Amino acid sequence: MSKPEPCCVIHARNISFAYDDKPVLKDVSFQVQAGEMVTIVGPNGGGKSTLLKILLGILEPRSGSLEILGKPSREALHLIGYVPQYARFDERFPITVEEVVLSGRIKPRFGFYSAGDRSHAREAMERVGMEDLAKNSFSALSGGQRQRVLIARALVGDPRILLLDEPTANVDAFMSERFIQLVSELAKERTVLLVTHDTGYVSGITDRVFCVNRGLEEHPAEDAGADLVHASYGQSVRAVRHDIKLPHPGEEAQR
Ligand SMILES: Nc1ncnc2c1ncn2[C@@H]1O[C@H](COP(=O)(O)OP(=O)(O)OP(=O)(O)O)[C@@H](O)[C@H]1O
């Protein structure tokens, strides 16, 4: 599949959100173009996961608007694949790798997955190199293998947008490098938003970086290093270029 032509895939305008009386996001505005890879960083509790949940339609913003491919977000949920930090499955009820991947398909008619569903699941497992373990128990897999399966589950509906929430958490460094390689391949075909604390891994593959800490600041890909994380966490003296309004593809940068 070739990378789609640039167009606005996600358009968030002045999104604010609070859990009861606790404000978490304030006036968050951004656009993401088709085929872009955007990395989301920020301090613990800054609101990254909350923002993903709003994109996924799990949470409703208190104010502001969100369009996905020109539609209100609730009409576009089938266009989004989501990879959680981890997924809990009851270890006493061993679910196979194939079943986990199939669970990413829309609910089967009459309770049975079709041959088409199984074929999509096989393709998704092949995509992440897990097809040989299709019948294995998910709970017996390593952290890195589990993450690949969760990516396959997110891909099985062929989403235009892939959201990954700290996919390398709980995965060792060697695995996470291979993992980022996979994400880089996937990002050639679709729009990817990746929440991570390990920006060093993504500096070579990301187009832009969003720092989320109640508000949202954009940074160029070159700033996606450990220093940016430190700056974002307020633990570094390195200046982060908040003075530059970053362009969307095809626009000029403005100071
Ligand atoms: N369901 C909830 N109810 C109340 N407060 C919540 C809820 N979920 C998150 N919060 C609070 O909202 C704030 C933002 O949380 P969120 O998980 O979005 O941050 P984050 O940037 O993803 O953090 P981390 O890097 O630690 O995963 C935090 O202060 C958190 O404690």
Image (cartoon, rainbow, N blue to C red):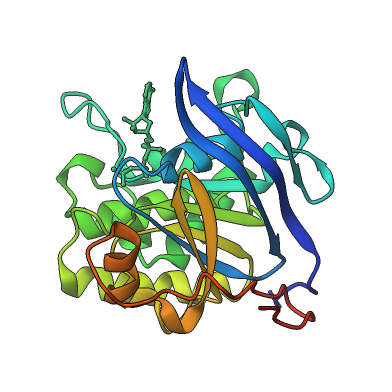
Task: Please tell me which residue lies in front, 194 or 126.
Answer: 194
Q: Residue at image x 58%, y 52%?
A: 120
Q: Which residue appears at 31% of the width and 54% of the height?
A: 147
Image position of 205 (left or right of 248): left
Quarter of the figure with residue 253: bottom right
Q: How many marks?
A: 0
In the image, residue 54 above or below residue 170: above
How far across and how far down the image is residue 31, in percent?
70, 58
Give the residue at x 63% y 66%: 190
Q: Residue furthest right?
A: 70
Q: Quadrant of residue 191?
A: bottom right
User: Which residue in the rendered view is the most extreme toward the top?
Assistant: 20
> Can you say which quadrant of the picture contains the N terminus?
bottom right
Q: Quadrant of ligand 1?
A: top left
Q: Is residue 118 left or right of residue 93?
A: right
Q: Is residue 49 visible?
A: yes
Q: Residue at x 76, y 83 (%)?
A: 252
Q: Position of residue 199 (x, y in %)?
A: 34, 70
> In the figure, 166 relative to 210: above or below?
above
Across and down, in percent, residue 134 comes to 34, 51
Q: Quadrant of residue 245?
A: bottom right
Q: Is residue 41 above or below residue 79?
A: below
Q: From the viewer's perspective, is 96 left or right of 76?
A: left
Front residue of 46 and 78: 46
Measuring from the top left, give residue 187's x and y in whole percent: 55, 71
Q: Quadrant of the C terminus?
A: bottom right
Residue 105 visible, this orientation: no
126 vs 88, nearest the viewer: 88
- The one of 247 and 188 positioned closer to us in this rendering: 247
